Amino acid sequence: MKSPAVEQKTFLLLLVCVTLAFGWILFPYYGAIFWGAILAMLFRPVFRWLLDRFKGRANLAALATLGLILVIVILPTAFITASLVQEGSALYQKLQSGDINVGRYAQQIFDHVPQWLMNLMQRFGIGDMGALQAKLMASLNQGGKNLASSAIVFGQNTFDFLVGFGVMLYLMFFLIRDGAELSNMIRDAIPLEPRHKRKLLGKFTTVIRATVKGNIAVAVAQGAIGGVTFALLGIHGAVLWGVLMAFLSLLPAIGAALVWGPVALYYLATGAYVPAGVLVFVGVFVIGLVDNILRPLLVGKDTKLPDWIVLISTLGGMALFGLNGFVIGPVIAAMFISAWDIFSTTKEEPQSPAAEADVAQ
């Protein structure tokens, strides 16, 4: 006769194998699946509201929610992406033709370096200004070309993008309509105590909503303000720099300043004090305060992870998963903290009399 323990272990092995195989099949479109699930989760309250208005017709409510996502999220993102590719291509051509010479801008800054600063640099062994200028100019030119060419590459692979986009929309419809049932099935299948499952799934949902709703809103606001300011000052590639500021705003404290700071420094060094003053004012008193004002309103203080965990998990997530990692990284960090918190709490809980009797035996 077959042993029940052997049958159970065999079934668990089969379960792990088919799960890994299924994940392997889905991996080529994990980005589309990931964002489809995220958007379905975020717009679930809208679906419930529409479901009441449409008198329980779930298909119609899901289609209306999907259309709302297209108008609010996907179409604006597509417009910004198209503008980003266009400006990136134009900037790359100007860099190639020499119309924009980043090295010349750096040279103008060096020409205005005060003598005391040059003497200080010489004391630290970096007084060879010619070699330093050459290295910095080469680095700035190469960095500008890489940044512009990256925007061009971002617009390539159109077929793969269209397939992934179709997969995302198709999946999103069913996740919007049947998401509650699927969530209940997953929750029931997790072999944990109900209170632990509630804590982990609650933390998972909270962090995803906080990261997407809060961080993306803050990033969009900071990038938009920076891009409009650059456009008003006549700086080339305002959309490109605005998008870059939006990405860098995910880094605490110094994010967007990595873009507007060097430009303000250039204006100061070349005597353009009015544009420099405008950039510093907008950067410090507008862009810098957006995070302090919007994030508590959209996220809430009780859902925030420590800044150093957010920074490390975001950078690590983006290094491993690309753009998707800025959500995946903090979610993994939050689940890591919650799982260890449950583990430590469980160890500290007093055992029941029956359990203590078993241990004594």
Image (cartoon, rainbow, N blue to C red):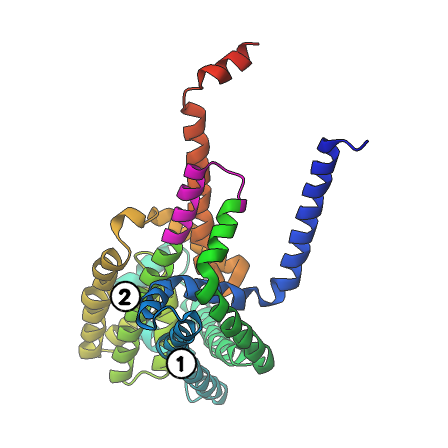
Q: What mark, if any, has residue 141 been given in the picture?
A: none
Q: Residue at x 29, y 75 (%)?
A: 224
Give, as a single range, the part of the protein colored magenta. 189-206
Report helix, strand or loop for mark 1. Answer: helix
Q: Can you name the residue that lies furthest to the top here? A: 361
Q: Position of residue 232 (x, y in %)?
A: 24, 84
Report helix, strand or loop for mark 2. Answer: helix
Is disc 2 surrounded by few (<14), some (14 to 19) or many (20+) residues within 10 Å? few
Quarter of the image that includes the N terminus: top right
Q: Is residue 337 visible?
A: no
Residue 1 or residue 343, whichever sits in front? 1
Residue 293 or residue 271, whichever sits in front? 293
Q: Residue at x 65, y 52 (%)?
A: 19
104 is higher (above) or lower (below) than 306:
below
Q: Nearer the viewer, mark 2 or mark 1?
A: 1
Q: Amino acid at mark 2?
A: Gln
**Left or right relative to 268: residue 8:** right
Q: Amino acid at mark 1?
A: Leu
Q: Position of residue 259 (x, y in %)?
A: 34, 69
Residue 269, image quadrant: bottom left
Sequence-wise, the earlier of marks 2 and 1 is 1
Q: What mark, if any, has residue 115 been given in the picture?
A: 2
Decide whether residue 193 is among the magenta residues.
yes
Quarter of the image that includes the C terminus: top right
313 is higher (above) or lower (below) than 158:
above
346 is higher (above) or lower (below) than 219:
above
Q: Position of residue 102 (x, y in %)?
A: 41, 79
Q: Residue at x 30, y 71 (%)?
A: 53
Q: Position of residue 239 (x, y in %)?
A: 36, 80
Q: According to the image, label 1 marks what residue?
A: 75
Q: From mark 2 to mark 1, how far is it between C-alphas?
A: 53 Å
What secondary structure predominates along the stretch shown in magenta? helix
